[in-house]
Image (cartoon, rainbow, N blue to C red):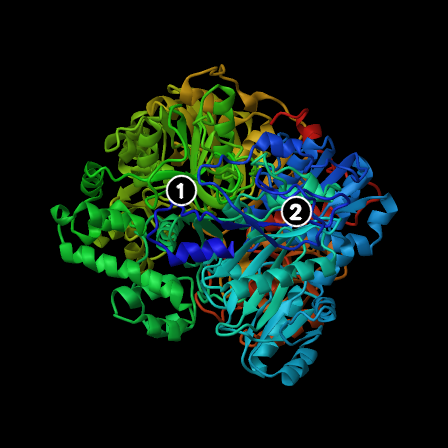
Amino acid sequence: MALCGRLARRAPTLPANFRTINTSITSRTFTSRASRPLLSLRTHHESSAVHRQLRAFTKVSANWDKTQEAPSAKAYLESGIIAGARDLVDVKKVLVIGSGGLSIGQAGEFDYSGSQALKALKEAGVHSVLINPNIATIQTSHVLADEIYYLPVTPEYVEYVIQKEKPDGIFLSFGGQTALNLGVNMNKMGIFDKYGVKVLGTSIKTLETSEDRDLFARALKEIEIPIAESIAVSSVDDALDAAEKIGYPIIVRAAYALGGLGSGFANDPEELRNLSSRSLSLSPQILVEKSLKGWKEAEYEVVRDASDNCITVCNMENFDPLGVHTGDSIVVSPSQTFSDEEYHMLRSASIKIVRHLGVVGECNVQYALQPDGLDYRVIEVNARLSRSSALASKATGYPLAYTAAKIGLGHTLPELPNAVTKTTTANFEPSLDYIVTKMPRWDLSKFQNVKRDIGSSMKSVGEVMAIGRTFEESFQKACRQVDPKFLGFQGDKFDDLDDTLKNPTDRRWLAVGQAMFHEGYSVDKVHDLTNIDKWFLYKLQNIVDLTHELEDIGSLFGLKKDVILQAKKLGFSDLQIAKAVNSTEDEVRARRKSFGIRPWVKKIDTLAAEFPADTNYLYTTYNASSHDVTFDDHGILVLGSGVYRIGSSVEFDWCAVNATLSLSKLGKKTVMINCKLNLSYPYYHICYSRHMQIDRGVRAVGCLKYNPETYSTDFDVADKLYFEELSYERVMDIYELETASGVVVSVGGQLPQNMALKLQESGKAKVLGTDPEDIDKAEDRHKFSSILDSIGVDQPAWKELTSFEEAQKFARSVSYPVLVRPSYVLSGAAMTVIRSEDELKDKLTAASEVSPDHPVVITQFIEGAQEIDCDAVASSGKLLVHAVSEHVENAGVHSGDATLVLPPNSLDESIKARVKEIAEKVAEAWKITGPFNMQIIKQDVEGAEPNLKVIECNLRASRSFPFVSKVLGTNFIDVATKALVGREVPEPVDLMAEKRDYLATKVPQFSWTRLAGADPYLGVEMASTGEMACFGKNLVEAYWTSMQSTMNFRLPVPGEGLLFGGEPTSDALVQIAKYVHPLGYKFFAANKDIKTLLESKADGVSVEVIEFPVKDKRALREVFAKYDIRGVFNLAKSRASSLVDEDYVMRRNAVDFGVPLFMEPKTAVLFAQCMSEKLPKKEGIPSEVRSWSDFVGGRTI
């Protein structure tokens, strides 16, 4: 990989498909410590001597004829090199531990790796039992797992499942830090020994050594591998003493933590005191370590089996120097700036470390490398599938998680065939002839008071992966994939540019762009401020120089063929070129095509053409001169959702994958497009192919995506998978190349939806399902409202905004509060509840910036109303299926942050019937074919039936489609797909009329702990990063387990302290006190008003008012410890206006100290009710411990 990386950067102008072949070349082969010798891969010119050697590269001289045929796959497999399994682990049923709800630091990557493990078990004929409350994913479907338990991933509940299912093995390496910590704890409790459950793969001892910072440091010293000078401590005083010995600046790292949680840099004792206090509230042990900020950072992905065969699959280099968490850094693979000596030095160290620790499976080693020497330090080792494993798998085409699962079952690397190529063993190291760029996506602007700096603790919510033949091409693709508003590498305005360059924030690459594009900073100056390697900066300077050249040309007709081609090779989009020459995207596209300049489609070729391999895992590039595939099948394009972000996450991946699978069952070819790195569907069938010189007969169905975390970017999902931008330009390029028969825009969230009208009108593409003109009528608030009026469906009063004076007049007429919202939004972006005229004036500007091409509307906000979700599918305006879910929270909490109950617990039959009637009217009015979702307000009216008002309608799949499908046992996307293509369309059925003896609750997963300074308060703008759902026979049972499924939730135990705060007139606080007081909790408050409220209205309650320092975090932590506060109920009426607001400080520090926080009245009361009914815990297995198939009556999805 180092070799290919150097070739890629040293000869960037060499045509990508052109290879110079010497008459005598050196080929690399290696063999392994196996129980029988392996034959090296040799041609007929070579000796057939068997080589026995210890896992090392050998150079074998090989005189290749230029016309020589590729090695025969059949002969290779028949040669006996793949020996077959010999020492398999004897297991019949294996428990797989999932990672739970998606959160910052632990997202779809682990869902992807768990899916791979399940697939490996299915192939081996081993019964799989999965515990994972994340209902939104492909992993939690019976297509992969035999039994699924939607339960908390805690020792208590996992032991219950072990008692019921009696597994003989368990996988702990595929569920991120959640599964690893669970395994370590359960092993200490003796649970695995008690029930005779084998831990498969890497041993608990190795996991403990890699996670315990002190043990880890000692282990590496035994083999003379350098690590940063460090001391493990478990108290603040010890941390201060350690720092004095090591010397400032230092970095604090927390043990048993994911994504750098609890870590940070400190330059003096005061910073360290505050940092270590917070870190020790999240982890029992921290490491005080000498800071190496400014060094290069690199990662190696390593695989080892129990027979000590060991390979490095991938190395990655961070664009940002050490000091920015790798999850928040731009990352390239293979490394571009390492010398051959540096590459092999770190590779050898990785293998030495992994062997010494005894890893069995996959492992990730992170390094700090001196920028101007050969000194290095090991930062950490993850002896499990890591976040980077998904990137490595999809960047190289090597199925790391699948291979690790097979190794866990006892296979060795030489006996495992490569799952994708089918022509080589898994005992090889991939070579790349392309460059991959991973870029993070942050959503920090959604949060009030959040600190936007990025450092050692991860804050990004998603990431994209872009593939190109040059760094410039790959980098510019990644910029656009992160957010469509970016044209490519560009700048932005900054108050203090130099400070932003020195001190990284989530907008750092934009600061580099601003410096180079607009401020005239040299490469040397940017390097001095950022420590970013000059090689990267010189490549970015190429983009800057060509941009200025285009601007000098200044007109469309000044664009010559060679200039356009050069721009495309450097990753410029048509729109980017158009802006530089004062033209339009369509005009530049037409001129480009008139010159015959179109992108070439290449396969992910992990074997650098050394061996034949086949894949449908594709990318486009202008740095080529031929296609690797044919375009004969006229498949259907399925557009994915792109990068994970707040409001668009793994739920849409579930929808896209199911649409693709349904199309395949209907005999349709599919082409998927996506850029998402962390999808959950097993990915190893598409990933491994190379240039085959024969017609492979690949089916041409596709899906467009660019997210490497996800299942929909797994290569065995679609007939063709394009890891590409979800832009009009790229979709039309692929649509035209494939001569596609249609495009699906309704299963990938808002991004494909926004493209629908242009695809049809400008691109003349055939959009399947609801007509894009009708989609526009639902997205445009004015058109939407007019149609609702015409069909007699009620809605809140609203007005289109044209001036502040009009808005002011409207708000006075309906009375405050009002809701300001733009059109075409997802997750409530720029939606704000306005409670006064001053607020109205402040907020209008912000909203108008979100979508300048569409108007902003102001709507009456109805307080105290209940919100209802309706997910449905229609065909030609006829309702086929629908689901009615109720929110626990009152309207005003975004639906993505709300608790959903299905079947609804409190809605009577007449309300459900009226919701169905509205759905039928809407389906007919918009002539809907495919999925759609409505949000409805139920407003109680004294002495009359409640008002039902539609507040939103999306003519696409929604976030809750996986939830309703799995709870009701009917795959809504399968029904929608049949409607889209008009094949096997089912007859209408009323699923809500069926009586069920269970219900499920979907709850949000927040990542407040990661977002330093953000106010944990719910509103109309979405804040959650994931979701979980659990089943039960009633609401209490389902919600009890759902809440315990949230990450790091620790149930307050009777006798511990509960802190109350918020609105001093809150009836909800009184109700909570009445529920939990009999259990024996101690009650505390920060002010006398709360004490008076509770003691006057709840019989027998005694509340102690405690000191509450709002400016001293360390003192406040001591207060929490002194009074043993293990739960916080803070029910404020509105968001805090200052950082010393008592309620803000209470909420913020509850999450910082790892204490459960309840800040919404309805759900807080519901959980208090759960505590009153479920505590003290009874003996035996609780009734909610049942498999999904047991609840719904079969394996339906």
Instruction: State the residue at coordinates (57%, 73%).
Output: 375
Instruction: Identify the image quadrant of the C terminus.
Output: top right
Left/right of residue 431 with respect to residue 311 in the rendered view: left
- As drawn, the label of residue 443 is none
Residue 958, given in percent of the width and then of the height, sits at: 46, 36
Q: Amino acid at mark 1?
A: Glu
Q: Amino acid at mark 2?
A: Phe
Q: Residue at x 66, y 27 (%)?
A: 1192
Q: Which mark is residue 724?
A: 1
Residue 408 is left or right of residue 608, and the answer is right
How far from the left and from the top, in percent, is residue 83? 72, 37
In the picture shown, does residue 1071 fall above or below 739?
below
Say which residue appears at 53% left-offset and 20% top-offset: 990
Q: Which residue occupies the foreground of this view, 771 or 856? A: 771
Give coordinates of residue 491: x percent, y percent: 30, 61
Q: Is residue 28 visible?
A: yes
Left or right: where 700 falls relative to 180: left
Could you tell which of marks 2 and 1 lies nearer the N-terminus? 2
Mark 2, residue position: 174
Label 2 sits on a secondary structure element that is: loop
Q: Residues within 10 Å of mark 1 (few under 14, many from 20)?
A: many
**In the image, residue 350 lies at what x, y percent?**
63, 60
Look at 36% across and 32% down and name the residue there.
794
| Badge 2: residue crowd in 10 Å (few <14, some 14–19, many ≥20) | many
